[in-house]
Amino acid sequence: MQSFPFVPKSSLGLQAGHFWGIKLLDDRFACGRVIQSPEPGSRTALLVGLLDWIDSAPPTSESIAGAKCLWQGRIHYKSIIQTGGSILGYRKLEEDGLAPWLFRGAVHWRNSEIYEGLSPIREQTPDDQELPVLATWGLTFIRQAAEENLGQQ
């Protein structure tokens, strides 16, 4: 049984469903959620989502119920520390219909793969152009995305 909050020391202790609060400039909170962890062969990278959720209080398992992902991307686990400090809790992704998205590995289809989250599943074809490219976010990108997409609500 895990106790909360906790500060991650690598991505290895993080599980899909963990979440953290992202403090915005107006003192409200957005929510980041671990979607897939860890990246195969990595102690630092994982797939997270920015939830379509904002509140004056930090997120709880109950308050984020039903919130969908606005964005998903690969981060370094230190992004959690930089944007929120600690993991506040856990909620099963299945309870909210969340799962890793399908991504292209690159803009151009040649020599690229399709990923389910961080896991390659097949070669990319020209028909896959509608899928987003798997992005690696900087340490504070999720906070910037939250400010731009949720801060005006």
Image: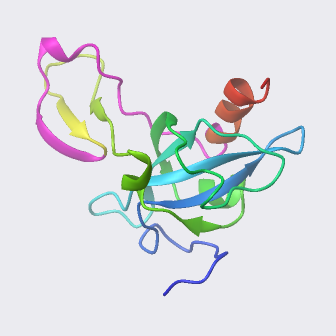
Residue 59 in sight? yes
Magenta stretch in the rendered image: 118-141
Vertically, is 39 above or below 29?
below
Where residue 91 sits in the image (x, y, percent)? 50, 62
Q: Residue at x 64, y 73 (%)?
A: 7
Q: Residue at x 50, y 38 (%)?
A: 68
Would residue 125 be found to the left or right of residue 18 on screen?
A: left
Q: Is residue 124 magenta?
A: yes
Quick one: 145 or 44, which is closer to the camera? 145
Q: Quadrant of residue 147?
A: top right
Where residue 5 sits in the image (x, y, percent)? 67, 75
Q: Residue at x 27, y 31 (%)?
A: 105
Decide whether the magenta segment is chiefly helix, strand or loop: loop
Would residue 139 be found to the left or right of residue 93 on screen?
A: right
Vertically, is 75 above or below 53?
below
Quick one: 147 or 62, which is closer to the camera? 62
Quick one: 42 or 129, which is closer to the camera? 129
Vertically, is 98 above or below 91?
above
Where residue 110 sits in the image (x, y, percent)? 14, 20
Would residue 131 be found to the left or right of residue 90 on screen?
A: left
